[in-house]
């Protein structure tokens, strides 16, 4: 079914430095889209944003839609977890019908139960699992087939790369003051503890295993492949190197805090932020932020480096050969001074600096900064340039960087791409460059509280749409969105060159 633009709409665009470019916009009407007030909960999008799903309330029931197509009607209960698979090809939700709960997958209903948990997908998107309760027993269901059963409560279900990599936690005496818990992985039960955290199923040093935190007798440990490590006053969630060769976590032993790498504790500090423990992309470097007194320092591969009152977590370059962080302090006057530090060298001082980012080829680093009187800068390789931060997009090519941002002015603003301002509007989305960086794609809102329009290379094209949306696809010659106009959902495609 084609919408009003089935025949296509063609526009001629002149982009700086390029020959004239033709843009054709086509629409495919997918079906009705409800007003936001009529939806139950959030509208879900697949990770690639090419598909969407929602529930509405109608005639005392809830109705499920996938890409604007009605797929099922259920009891008027709270819908649990509308979730897409990692590849975006499947969608599942926990719903009820006639008082019985079930999981619906791609609009197909699974077996009924007294209760079901949130469904989860395997990493390869080929399997879906959940916990069900029937006649006072808990069951693990994978692809609508029972895989495990227990008279005790089952929770914290995890699927790894495929259906065989199944982990969950069994809780005995859950209503008592002192329950006991056991983690089960691939059908094998581990030791009993007073409490167990969410298991992780991962590949560590060549083996697929389950890893989880556990608590017993006022102490914490990290259990790796069923074997507990040393007990501490606290342990954090583990961090795995991208190649699976190393595992690190933060442990507290009395007043001392350590990073434990592959079972070996490092130097002791007054504090360590577990959220800033990071491996390089190749897994060969480990960085974290440690505190001694009121000062923080970056610890890289066991060696102390940059210090400051506040130090950000390390950012590694894609090739793992470079790193960057920020360090800031408070002057006696009360002013704040911050610097980015790249490969150990300090950059210019500002009042605030943003998170550094590396180019894909690892040759360049950039970040935003703010000076006194609210002056905003973009800093590339230590060279600051006045530049707003709103909708900032930076892409590097061998010819140099391409930069886009939103520039405010009275009554609205404009998107600026490589120094060229676009049409004025009340607002705009963040621009997306095509992979070859020859085109910039975004949406603009011409009037405050009004509809939105697609813009290709600063030229508005196609009709107006009721809602803003991120593009679901951007190639060198095409961009695609899911957009709504007059309560109809369209798949909109702009084709250029």
Image: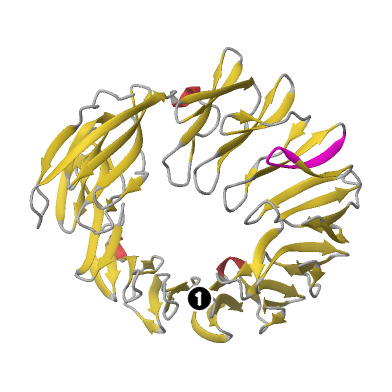
Q: Which residues are magenta?
A: 136-145
Task: Provide the major secondary structure of the magenta segment.
Answer: strand
Quarter of the view holding residue 472? top left
Query: Residue 213, image x and y in percent?
Result: 75, 63
- Please indicate whether residue 127 sits to the left or right of residue 455 in the image: right
Given residues 332 and 43, the one toward you in this image is 43
Given residues 178 and 294, the one toward you in this image is 178
Quarter of the view holding residue 238? bottom right
Q: In this figure, which residue is indicated by the disc labeled 1?
A: 282
Which image quadrant: the N terminus? top left
- Check residue 138 for magenta coloring: yes
- Please indicate whether residue 235 sits to the left or right of residue 367 in the image: right
* Residue density around tag 1, few if under 14, some if 14–19, many if 20 or more, within 10 Å: some
Residue drawn at x 31%, y 45% as measured from the top left: 429
- Check residue 281 for magenta coloring: no
Q: How many marks?
A: 1
**Residue 8, can we see it?**
yes
Query: Residue 409, image x and y in percent?
Result: 19, 46
């Amino acid at each position: 079914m084609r919408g009003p633009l089935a025949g296509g709409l063609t526009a001629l665009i002149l982009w700086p430095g390029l020959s004239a470019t033709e843009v054709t916009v086509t629409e495919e009407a997918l079906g009705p889209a409800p007003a936001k007030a009529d939806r139950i909960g959030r509208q879900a999008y697949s990770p690639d944003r090419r598909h969407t799903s929602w529930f509405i309330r109608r005639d005392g029931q809830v109705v499920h839609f996938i890409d604007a197509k009605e797929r099922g009607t259920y009891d008027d209960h709270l819908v649990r977890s509308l979730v897409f698979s990692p590849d975006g090809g499947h969608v599942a939700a926990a719903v009820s019908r006639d008082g019985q709960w079930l999981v619906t997958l791609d609009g197909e209903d699974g077996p009924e139960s007294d209760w079901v948990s949130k469904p989860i997908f395997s990493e390869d998107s080929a399997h879906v699992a959940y916990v069900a309760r029937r006649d006072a027993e808990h069951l693990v269901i994978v692809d609508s087939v029972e895989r495990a059963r227990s008279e005790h409560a089952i929770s914290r279900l995890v699927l790894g790369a495929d259906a065989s990599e199944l982990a969950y936690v069994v809780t005995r005496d859950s209503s008592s003051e002192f329950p006991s818990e056991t983690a089960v992985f691939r059908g094998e039960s581990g030791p009993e503890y007073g409490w167990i955290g969410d298991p992780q199923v991962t590949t560590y040093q060549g083996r697929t295993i389950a890893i989880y935190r556990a608590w017993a007798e006022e102490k914490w440990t990290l259990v790796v492949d069923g074997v507990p490590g040393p007990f501490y006053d606290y342990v954090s969630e583990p961090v795995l190197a991208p190649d699976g060769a190393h595992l690190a976590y933060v442990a507290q032993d009395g007043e001392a805090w350590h990073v434990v790498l592959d079972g070996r504790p490092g130097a002791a500090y007054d504090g360590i932020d577990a959220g800033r423990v990071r491996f390089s992309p190749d897994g060969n470097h480990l960085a974290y932020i440690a505190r001694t007194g009121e000062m923080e320092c970056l610890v890289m591969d066991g060696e102390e480096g940059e210090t400051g009152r506040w130090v950000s977590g390390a950012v590694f370059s894609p090739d793992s050969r470079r790193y960057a962080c920020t360090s800031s302090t408070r002057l006696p006057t009360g002013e704040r001074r911050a610097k980015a530090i790249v490969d150990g060298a300090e950059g210019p001082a500002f009042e605030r600096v943003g998170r550094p980012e590396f180019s894909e080829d690892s040759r360049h680093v950039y970040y935003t900064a703010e000076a006194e009187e609210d002056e905003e800068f973009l800093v590339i390789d230590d060279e600051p340039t006045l530049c707003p931060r709103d909708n900032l997009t930076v892409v590097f090519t061998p010819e140099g960087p391409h930069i886009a941002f939103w520039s405010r002015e009275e009554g609205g603003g404009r998107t600026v791409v490589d120094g060229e301002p676009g049409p004025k509007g009340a607002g705009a989305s963040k621009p997306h460059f095509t992979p070859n960086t020859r085109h910039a794609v975004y949406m603009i809102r011409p009037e405050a509280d009004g509809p939105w329009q697609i813009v290709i290379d600063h030229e508005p094209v196609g009709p107006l749409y009721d809602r803003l949306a991120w593009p679901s696809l951007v190639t060198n010659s095409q961009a695609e969105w899911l957009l709504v106009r007059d309560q109809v959902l369209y798949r909109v495609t702009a084709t250029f060159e």
